[in-house]
Image (spheres, rainbow, N blue to C red):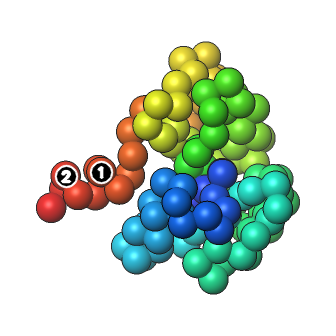
Amino acid sequence: MKTWAIVGLGNNPERAAFGVAKLLQDKGHTIIPVYPRAEIVHGENGFKTLSEIPVPVDVVDCFVNSKLVGKVVDEAISIGAKAVWLQLDVIDQEAIARAQAAGLLTVMDRCPAIEYRNRN
C-alpha cells in the first residue's frame, strides 16, 4: 500500500496531517494531498477531490471531522481505493461498514505515525 491520498492535507505545519504526510513520504510512500485549495504539499501536487486523482490510490487517509468522513469514505469506494484510514478521533461506524462491505481494508481511530513508531 504505497500510494496514500491524504484528505485534509494542506500547507499548515500546525496540523497533524502535515507531519503525518511527511513521515509517510519519508517511509517511501507516495502522498497525494486532497484539500479544497488543491495545494502543493511536500512537493506533491494536490487535488480538490479524490475523483480528480489520475492514478490508482491504495489508501485514503482521512483527516476530516467524523460528521464529514462518510462522504469521503463513499468517494474512496467509488474510486476503487484498497483501504480507508480514519485518523485519531475520526469515528463513523456506518462508513466503515460500507467500506468493508465494498471489500476495502479499514482502520479507524488510529494514526499511521504512531503505528510506525510502535513497530520499531
**Residue type marked 1:** Ile
Q: Is residue 77 visible?
A: no
Q: Residue at x 39, y 39 (%)?
A: 110
Q: CA distance from mark 1 to mark 2?
A: 6 Å
Q: Quadrant of residue 57?
A: bottom right
Give the answer, above or below, for where 44 lies relative to 109. below
**Tag 1 and tag 2, C-beta contact below 8 Å:** yes
Q: Residue furthest front?
A: 14
- Where the C terminus falls, by quadrant? bottom left
Give the answer, above or below, for where 56 lies relative to 77. below
Q: Residue furthest left?
A: 120
**Residue type marked 2:** Asn
- 10 Å crowding of disc 2: few (<14), some (14-19), many (20+): few
Q: Residue at x 61, y 27 (%)?
A: 66
Foreground: 76 or 62? Answer: 62
Residue carrying label 2: 118
SS label for mark 1: helix
Q: Residue at x 61, y 64 (%)?
A: 12
Q: Is residue 113 visible?
A: yes
Residue carrying label 1: 114
